Amino acid sequence: MEKPTLKDYAKAAEIGVNKKYVDQRMKELDWSLERAITTPVGTSWEGNEKNKKLLKLAEKNGVSESTFYRRKRNGMTPYEAATTAKGFEKYIPLAESNGISNKTFYQRVKRKMDPYEAATKPPRKYEKKQIS
């Protein structure tokens, strides 16, 4: 791995990249010297326009930008991240018709219950007894 020279640091400083950031890019992110000193701060290597069309598609499908990027980060393909419906929207009306609140439904799903079962299993009919 190359070590940056003072000239390299000066070249990076011209575009707003300080010495510490150049070192971090090379050591922690495993970037090449050329990439570390020529890429401005706050831009990705691919460019910002990479996902514009898919973001518009996601917006049409009711998926926010942050949800789109989180899904991509978690391993979904960009198209899948843009077109998959959010959450459990189709189960919420079913749960409400069965007398199950949103909070109860989401807690059941969080505890690994099948979404359909969580929406159809009747809630407890008795209150917990208070001991003290």
Image (cartoon, helix red, strand yellow):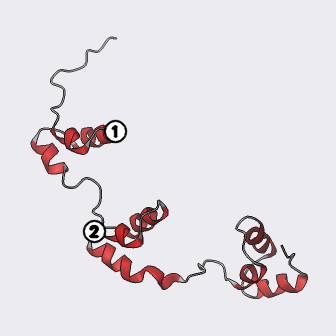
Name the secondary structure under disc 1: loop
In the rendered view, would you say 47 is above or below 67? below
Residue found 79% across the figure and 70% down from its top: 23
What percent of the width, then of the height, locates residue 46? 56, 82
Q: Quadrant of residue 122?
A: top left
Q: Quadrant of residue 19?
A: bottom right
What percent of the width, then of the height, locates residue 60? 27, 75
Is 98 left or right of 80, judged from the image as shown? left
Residue found 68% across the figure and 83% down from its top: 39
Residue found 72% across the figure and 74% down from its top: 31
| Circle nearer the N terminus (2, 1) | 2
Q: Quadrant of residue 115?
A: top left
In the rendered view, would you say 49 is above or below 1? below
Q: Amino acid at mark 2?
A: Gly
Q: Nearer the viewer, residue 83 or 59?
A: 83
Is 113 left or right of 39, judged from the image as shown? left
The residue wearing badge 1 is: 112
Q: Which mark is residue 20?
A: none
Q: Which mark is residue 62?
A: 2
In the rendered view, would you say 109 is above or below 33? above
Marks 2/1: CA–CA distance: 25 Å
The quarter of the rendered structure image containing the N terminus is: bottom right
Q: Residues within 10 Å of mark 1 (few under 14, many from 20)?
A: few
What percent of the width, then of the height, locates residue 48? 51, 82
